[in-house]
């Protein structure tokens, strides 16, 4: 089939009807087509008769077609014939990583989860001796069906004439770059792919934590081991996607995000060289429906009405007896203490009031002694700025027990000097339900030294505690021992503090 014969409307194998030419480069053309047998869109590659690597691309496509990992784009057909060579694969609709980070970096856990999925999929591909070799942000897609897809496996490398002496190491570095981009919004490579270039320091790319505040230390280390081992001395590089997938195995996986209502105007279409890709508007998480617990009704036993009346009569008699006894006791006490004369007023028992003053913390920090030492430190001041529109919140976890990664996280207030804490009010916000928090006070920021002054068993709205005996200390810790019981952000769990007020004895 000559290039002139390949036009919109051409039908291949009597079923794949070419509709729109998406991309042409180096003698290969990507089309959006319709599989008329199954009535679904597909991506079709056609090739010029003189395309130099036709055998290689068809062979790679056939190897990819035997892989069953759902995160890899499925290849349906690959045919090499004089004038009729083509590759048919899945048409993918969704957001590329470029789309997702156009407005800024992703939440660290979500970026890590997306790359973890891609790393696991590539580990399976390498078991079949098939590598990707040219990973870019356009190859990582969050689909319209709320799943991850990795485009271009095997085929794109042949189309772009990319080879590697160590395919596993090349793909591991590529995955590290994808994670870097997700964490920072910058691309650490020669081409920019529509993203700002990663900043440099001493001839090396800056680490994610140097570019974006709030990147957890363990993710910074994983990126460095994948692509920047020279950035941190003494690190052992990852050499395979399987090693990187294992390092990210404890990260909570991405959860479905609500899709927007269909829009009349469609955005521009971009695509991988090997698969089609529809780009949708970025999705934003919507409000979660209230959780409804089923009500269990027990059947009434026969004769329940008579039994209830008898029981009610007994209860009324007991209450009347108790009220009469209480009145007799009260009258006796008044008689013994003297009855006020007519026109006189009884003097009430004086109440001792402890004078207090509000104490502003000298500094506030996220507290993660069981992890990397800090927890969203860049948000800490939001908890003491007095604004209901800002908050400090923890990292996002896959479950209320911190994804079983640690025992707790918190917010540490340094009061500047030791103060007798009498009262404390914490506004946890209105979104959370459940969760447990300990308020700890002491003169050391060591978790084991701080004493528990109070426990909140529900972290929703404003909570206040008054200490019977003021506890003295320089540090006040709001320590989450369990996160709220329902996800509060994109299906993930995290604790939050909107505002904190500490009162001390004058």
Image (spheres, helix red, strand yellow):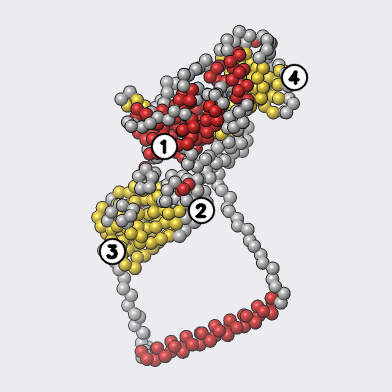
User: Residue at left 35%, top 48%?
Assistant: 369
The CA span between labels 3 and 4 is 86 Å
Direction from residue 302 to residue 155 in the image, left or right: left
Q: Position of residue 119 (x, y in %)?
A: 50, 32
Precedes in sequence: disc 2 or disc 1: 1
Precedes in sequence: disc 3 or disc 4: 4
Q: Position of residue 108 (x, y in %)?
A: 44, 38
In the image, residue 234 above or below residue 316: above
Mark 2 vs mark 1: in front: 1
The CA span between labels 2 and 1 is 26 Å
Q: Position of residue 344 (x, y in %)?
A: 36, 87
User: Residue at left 60%, top 57%?
Assistant: 293
- Tell me the quarter of the image containing the C terminus: bottom left
Precedes in sequence: disc 2 or disc 4: 4
User: Residue at left 49%, top 17%?
Assistant: 163
- Label placed on residue 50: none
Q: Identify the residue under disc 3.
A: 505
Q: Identify the residue under disc 1.
A: 219
Q: Identify the residue under disc 4.
A: 14
Q: Looking at the image, do the residues carrying marks 3 and 4 touch, with CB atoms under 8 Å apart?
A: no
> Dot 2: what SS?
loop
Precedes in sequence: disc 3 or disc 2: 2
> Dot 1: what SS?
helix
Q: Identify the residue under disc 2.
A: 485
User: Residue at left 47%, top 36%?
Assistant: 246
Q: How many marks?
A: 4
The CA span between labels 2 and 4 is 55 Å
Nearer-the-camera pick, 425 or 398: 398
> Dot 4: what SS?
loop
Direction from residue 271 to residue 495 in the image, left or right: left
The answer to whether residue 69 is seen in the rendering is yes
The answer to whether residue 383 is seen in the rendering is no
């Amino acid at each position: 089939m000559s290039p002139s014969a390949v036009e919109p409307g051409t039908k291949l194998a009597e079923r794949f009807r070419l509709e729109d030419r998406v991309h042409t480069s180096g003698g290969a053309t990507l089309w959006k087509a319709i599989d008329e047998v199954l009535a679904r869109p597909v991506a079709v590659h056609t090739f010029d008769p003189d395309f130099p690597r036709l055998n290689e691309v068809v062979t790679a496509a056939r190897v990819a077609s035997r892989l069953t990992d759902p995160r890899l784009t499925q290849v349906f057909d690959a045919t090499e014939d004089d004038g009729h060579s083509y590759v048919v694969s899945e048409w993918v609709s969704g957001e590329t990583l470029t789309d997702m980070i156009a407005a800024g970096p992703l939440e660290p856990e979500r970026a890590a989860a997306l790359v973890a999925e891609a790393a696991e999929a590539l580990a399976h591909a390498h078991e079949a001796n098939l590598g990707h070799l040219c990973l870019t942000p356009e190859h990582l897609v969050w689909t319209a069906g709320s799943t991850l897809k990795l485009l271009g496996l095997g085929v794109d490398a042949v189309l772009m004439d990319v080879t590697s002496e160590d395919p596993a190491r090349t793909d591991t570095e590529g995955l590290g770059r994808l994670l870097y981009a997700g964490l920072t919004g910058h691309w650490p490579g020669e081409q920019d792919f529509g993203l700002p270039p990663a900043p440099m320091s001493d001839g090396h790319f800056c680490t994610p934590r140097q570019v974006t505040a709030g990147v957890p230390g363990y993710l910074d280390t994983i990126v460095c081991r994948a692509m920047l081992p020279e950035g941190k001395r003494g690190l052992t590089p990852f050499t395979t996607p399987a090693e990187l997938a294992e390092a990210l195995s404890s990260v909570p996986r991405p959860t479905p995000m609500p899709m927007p209502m269909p829009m009349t105007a469609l955005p521009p279409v971009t695509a991988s060289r090997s698969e089609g890709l529809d780009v949708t508007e970025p999705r934003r998480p919507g409000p979660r429906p209230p959780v409804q617990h089923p009500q269990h009704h027990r059947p009434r036993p026969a004769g329940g009405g008579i039994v209830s009346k008898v029981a009610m009569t007994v209860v009324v008699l007991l209450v009347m007896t108790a009220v009469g006894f209480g009145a007799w006791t009260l009258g006796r006490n008044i008689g013994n203490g003297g009855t006020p004369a007519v026109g006189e007023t009884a003097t009430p028992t004086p109440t001792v009031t402890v004078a207090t003053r509000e104490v502003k913390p000298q500094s506030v920090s996220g507290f993660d002694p069981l992890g990397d030492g800090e927890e969203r430190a860049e948000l800490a001041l939001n908890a003491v700025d007095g604004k209901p529109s800002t908050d400090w919140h923890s990292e996002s976890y896959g479950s209320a027990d911190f994804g079983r990664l640690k025992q707790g996280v918190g917010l540490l207030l340094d009061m500047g000097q030791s103060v007798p804490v009498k009262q404390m009010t914490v506004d946890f916000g209105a979104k959370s339900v459940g969760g447990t928090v300990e308020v700890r006070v002491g003169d050391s920021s060591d978790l084991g030294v701080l004493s528990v002054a109070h426990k909140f068993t529900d972290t929703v709205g404003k909570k206040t505690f008054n200490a019977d005996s003021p506890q003295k200390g320089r540090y006040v810790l709001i320590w989450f021992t369990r996160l709220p019981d329902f996800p509060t952000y994109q299906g993930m769990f995290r604790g939050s503090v909107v505002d904190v007020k500490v009162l001390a004895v004058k």
